[in-house]
Image (tube, grey):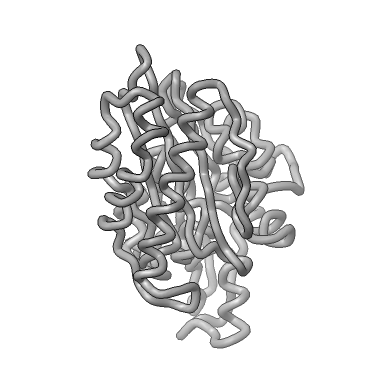
Amino acid sequence: MQTPPQSNCPVGQVAVHRELTQSWPAGAQSLPSLLPTPTLVQSPVAPQKVRSLAGSTHAPPQTICNPGQEHAPEVHARCPLIARVARHVANVRVRSVGTVGGNLAFADPHSDLATVFLLFDAKVRLSARAGERELALGDFVVGPYETSRRDEEILTSVRLLPWPAGTAGAYVKYGLHERPTLGVAVALTVAGGAVRGARIAVGCVGPRPQRLAGAEGRLGGWSLADVERRAEEVGAEAAAAIDAVDDLHGSAEYKRDMTRVFVRRALLVAAGRAAGRESHERHPHTVVV
């Protein structure tokens, strides 16, 4: 892609625009848009994977090149949780204009998509004149507003691995403001009446979203009744494992306690869905997806 000599192409325009009201990026004299670039919004999909287009928005407006994650047929059919979460990202303006690639590349620690994408073993593709490389999302996001992207690279696509058959999931987030204070994503794969695979990711409480392998492993072999009865134990283990930090959304101690509570709640929702039941329990300032 041709850009002016003193331009930066760091992230999506929507994320950057807020920062530009405070300070212009050092050395930048222009901010190119990636949305009209056809090669960034069209990509083949492998049979066993879904490629989420970096240039596609979270929701409408819909076009052939840019259907939005909420209505993209492939995402809706094979990764429905992402389609549902897209309806609750930020506000209408951001959902209509902000892109998936911009959201991830900005690496805002209070992001919905990065947390949910961890459940789908997401990998990002970075392109430059010298070639392309692919990174696991967990390696791409290294801290608050910090990624492994090199100066000359553009994030062009995100590859997702759909869940196996028999998997039910949920995303639960809490927040008093536009950005969530906490987001918990959970998926349970059940076969023969027992949990054969579990995925738990927690975001918005620390420098970057985390998959919690210890808490996931604890669920192996449990029945759905065990999950519902012992969800508090898993929540406590998750709370002990997260890298919580103090910020304007709350203290690290507060966030660990919220993680304990919301991992339990998310597990109960996912276990109910795996059993064919939908929970209608709701809590203040909470979105259940």
Quarter location, residue 254: bottom left
- Residue depicted at x 38% and y 56%: 209
Task: Count all numbered tags in the image, as a single digit.
Answer: 0
Horizontal relation, residue 152 to residue 282: left or right: left
- Residue depicted at x 44% and y 37%: 160
Q: Is residue 107 above or below residue 57?
A: below
The x, y position of residue 154, in whole percent, is 45, 58
Among all residues in the image, which is located at the extreme front? 229
The x, y position of residue 201, in whole percent, is 38, 48
Question: Residue 261 or 175: which is nearer the viewer?
Answer: 261
The x, y position of residue 68, in whole percent, is 66, 44
Horizontal relation, residue 87 to residue 42: left or right: right
Among all residues in the image, which is located at the extreme top? 192
Quarter location, residue 250: bottom left
Question: Residue 107 or 25: which is nearer the viewer?
Answer: 107
Horizontal relation, residue 225 to residue 34: left or right: left
User: From this viewpoint, is residue 144 visible?
Assistant: yes
The x, y position of residue 34, in whole percent, is 59, 58
Question: Residue 234 or 106: which is nearer the viewer?
Answer: 234
User: From this viewpoint, is residue 57 visible?
Assistant: no
Question: Residue 74 or 1: which is nearer the viewer?
Answer: 74
- Residue depicted at x 66% and y 53%: 36
- Residue depicted at x 48% and y 50%: 156
